[in-house]
Image (spheres, rainbow, N blue to C red):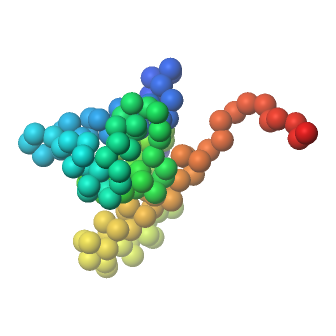
Amino acid sequence: MIVVVEKPKNESIGQYVARRVRELRAGYGTRGISQEALARGLAIAPNTVSRWEAGRNTPNIEIIEKLARFFGVGIYDLLPGPRPEPDTAIEALLRAAKKLTPKDVEELRRYAEFRHARTVYHARTPGRRRKAP
């Protein structure tokens, strides 16, 4: 079963990511976190966070993965689209994961989310292809 998180029809992926970053930043800790503090935590320029939130730039998938780690959420929490539920095809992986340490299990989960989100994030939008000159 796949759970789909809907984004408003007029909202682009960049706008969705911008909104989620604002929400996560505002809800961080007890008082939220400033754009500058988030930028320091990600080792990026402070104005970069401002550009994301304003929708002028969109972070690439590697930065989205860093954001997810920083906020302690999955990549799926930062991107719209399908969220796969466990099924029988994954049971063998789950059995093997039971033998891992909690830290390794968390790393495995994040890696799997990263791999899936990368395909969602880099999906081409439908439309006409331009003819070669």
Q: Position of residue 72 (x, y in %)?
A: 26, 54
Q: Residue at position x 59%, y 47% from top? A: 122
Q: Is residue 27 above or below residue 107?
A: above
Q: Nearer the viewer, residue 90 or 110?
A: 110
Residue at 78%, 31% in the rendered image: 128
Q: Position of residue 106 (x, y in %)?
A: 31, 66
- The quadrant of the image that shows the C terminus is top right
Toward the viewer: 54 or 68?
Answer: 54
Residue 80 found in image quarter = top left
Identify the residue at horizontal 42%, vertical 54% (top origin).
Answer: 63
- The residue depicted at 49 percent of the width and 50 percent of the height is 60
The front one of 87 and 4 is: 4
Residue situated furthest top in the rendering: 10
> What is the total number of numbered labels drawn onto the structure image?
0
Q: Position of residue 81 (x, y in %)?
A: 48, 38
Image position of 96 with respect to 44: above or below: below
Question: Would you say residue 33 is visible in this rendering?
Answer: yes
Q: Residue 132: horizontal and vertical position, in percent?
A: 89, 41
- As drawn, which residue projects farthest toward the left? 30
Could you tell whether 54 is left or right of 10 in the image? Answer: left
Whether residue 117 is visible, yes or no, is no
- Is residue 132 left or right of 111 when viewed as pictured? right
